[in-house]
Image: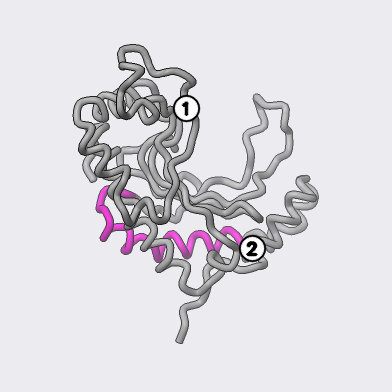
Amino acid sequence: MKPKPYFSFETYRFLRELALNNRREWFTANKERYEETVRLPAQRFIVDFGPVLRKISSHFTADPRPVGGSLFRIYRDVRFGRDKRPYKTHLGIQFRHESAKDAHTPGFYLHIEPAGSFLAAGIWHPDAPTLARIRQAIDADPKSWKKARDDQRFRSLFELSGDSLLRIPRGYDAEHPFAEDLMRKDFIASLSLTEREVTASSFLAYFAAACAAVSPFVRYLCRATGLPF
């Protein structure tokens, strides 16, 4: 018997309709749909991925709590931006390192959005001291960085992405063999996902295999920043 899929085309349908009706009145009237097709499936996915994640690394957490856990809130913070739409039009789940206090530390991330779903891993927008440690690690031991960055299984699935500086950081040679990597402001690897893949009954196994494939990259970032993997 095939396992029941976690996410469905109804998940995507809700997110599409939310994008067209991003108002409190509409969301309140459709909150039961949100619970049934988005939040509860996400929490079930988090619970079931927990034991699999521990086989990859015991230092990352799968926390199904609706607030403060792995699931990002659907509500947007509209206090400081011009965009006052109250709701996110995607589903975000992050499996963070146990030492993490926010999203800017090593982790595995699942993003579900119509025409834009993906799996990502690494560190997004690290703070200045963390970014400095990664650059120092690359400069001090370029062979270890190259081994992690160019791991065959990892690079057959993932692409490196994120923001970069326009010039080499101060203190590094512009002719450095890894100048492009030293200019990175994000150390993120991403893998695009189709709706068919996300809604398949085998998605948990697929997601787990992809996380295992990207783990050498995440392991390197953990070690570079003084964290256990």
Q: Main secondary structure of the magenta part?
A: helix
Q: For the magenta stretch, what is the residue range?
A: 38-60
- Residue in the image at 26% along x and 53% along y: 57
Q: Residue beneath label 2, please?
A: 11
9 sits left or right of 118 in the view? right
- C-alpha distance separating marks 1 and 2: 34 Å
Describe the element under mark 2 as helix, strand or loop: helix
Report if residue 57 lies within the magenta region.
yes
From this view, report whether residue 18 is shown above or below residue 2. Answer: above
- The mark found on residue 114 in the picture is none
Badge 1: residue crowd in 10 Å (few <14, some 14–19, many ≥20): some
**Quarter containing the N terminus:** bottom left
Asked whether residue 55 is in view, the answer is yes
Badge 2: residue crowd in 10 Å (few <14, some 14–19, many ≥20): many
Indicate which disc, 1 or 2, sits on the residue closer to the N terminus.
Answer: 2
Amino acid at the residue labelled 2 = Thr
- Residue 77: which quarter of the image? top right
- Residue in the image at 60% along x and 60% along y: 38
Q: Residue beneath label 1, please?
A: 164
Amino acid at the residue labelled 1 = Ser
39 sits left or right of 203 in the view? right
